[in-house]
Amino acid sequence: MFRLDGKVALVSGAGRGMGFGVAQILARQGATVVINDYYSERAEVATRLLQDEGLRAQAAVVDMTDRSAIFAMVEKLVAEHGAIDVFVHNAGIPAQGWGYSQFMESPPAEWDAWLQLNLHGLMHACQAILPGMMARRWGRIVAINSDASRTATGMGLCAYGAAKAAAIGFIRNLSGEVGRHGITANALSLGTMNNWEGSEQIARKTASVGRAGSPQDVGAAVAYLSSPEAEWINGQVLPVNGGSLVS
Ligand SMILES: NC(=O)c1ccc[n+]([C@@H]2O[C@H](COP(=O)([O-])OP(=O)(O)OC[C@H]3O[C@@H](n4cnc5c(N)ncnc54)[C@H](O)[C@@H]3O)[C@@H](O)[C@H]2O)c1
């Protein structure tokens, strides 16, 4: 079950972190994965790591906020592979390394950066990819989201949380338009992940399973939502958070 043999999956921001884990698990499930990243070195290193495992992977270096570059990438991939069956929008933390600020200190440019990547990037990519999925009457879209869209951490996440909430609103509405075309659109709401300093200590206190999440935890959930067996899951937001928020 949950095999992806013969499918082509594009994962944005997959050069490291959660996106790499997603690409790795999708490839292990049989997909050919396209590792998108803003930085060519990250995309190339990640691609080589999967190829060294004997998996099918290729790099695509594109800024996921650049609409025309996204359309060009999709056109090239479809010409090469015939289809993009699965799209995972994982890139969500701006490549230039935007920090978090308390609301009253957060400049409009910071809000723009979060929204450009989390909402507009997802929207551009979906407009590029969906015509092919609709023509083939099969597709899976998964947006990597965050519990920051529904919590009040006080940690300066207003712009980030708002951008993530906007993406969820988009995914839910999109699901209502694409479901009858054989396409599902869902999101994952991630909790505290293990790729930043101090996350293990926080997760030990906040996650009922007692640890931070790994890229492979995210990959497993994406693999399920991308599989043929998940055909009846549409417009949903699946918490992947170790039980830290349960509603
Ligand atoms: N790490 C966490 O604790 C956590 C928690 C909740 C949600 N998330 C979400 O998980 C996703 C991945 O987070 P992560 O921690 O793995 O991030 P990360 O920064 O480790 O990796 C993200 C990758 O995306 C790439 N990227 C950034 N901007 C890009 C762009 N414009 N175009 C293409 N690639 C771009 C980066 O170069 C980087 O390689 C994000 O959507 C994030 O919001 C993470």
Image (cartoon, rainbow, N blue to C red):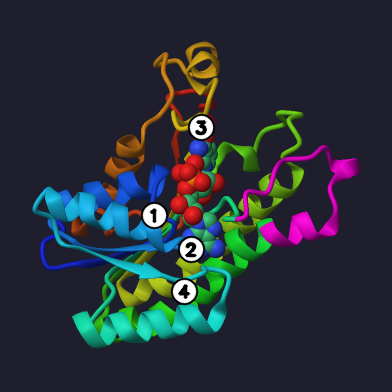
Distance, label 1 to label 2, CA atoms, is 8 Å
Query: From which residue to which does the magenta span run?
Result: 96-113
Marks 2 and 4, how far apart at CA: 18 Å
Residue at image mark 4? 126
Give the vertical position of 85 relative to 233 (above or below). below
Q: Which dot, 2 or 3, sits closer to the camera?
A: 2
Residue at (67%, 45%) from the top-left corner? 161
Does the residue at mark 1 contact the one at mark 2 (Cβ under 8 Å)?
A: yes
**Mark 1 / mark 3, whichever is N-terminal:** 1
Residue 57 at x, y percent in the picture: 21, 62
Residue at point 47% right, 78% down? 70
Q: Does the residue labelled 1 lie within 8 Å of ligand 1?
A: yes
At 55% from the left and 42% from the top, the residue drawn is: 146
The residue sitting at the front extreme is 41
Q: Distance between the residues labelled 4 and 1?
A: 24 Å
Residue 109 shown in magenta = yes
Q: Can residue 154 be seen in this view?
A: yes
- Above or below, 203 against 90 in this view is above
Residue type pointed to by label 2: Tyr
Task: Give the number of the mark in front: 2 or 4.
Answer: 2
What SS does tag 1 mark? helix
Which element type, helix, strand or loop, lies under badge 3?
A: loop
Q: Are marks 2 and 4 in contact (CB under 8 Å)?
A: no
Tell me which amino acid carries mark 4: Cys
Read off the residue under disc 1.
42
Which one is earlier in the sequence, the residue at label 4 or at label 3? 4
Determine contact: label 4, label 1, CB under 8 Å: no
Comparing marks 1 and 3, which lies closer to the viewer?
1
What number is the disc on residue 191?
Answer: 3
User: Is residue 91 visible in this depiction of the protein?
Assistant: no
Find the distance from the CA under tag 4 to the CA under tag 3: 25 Å
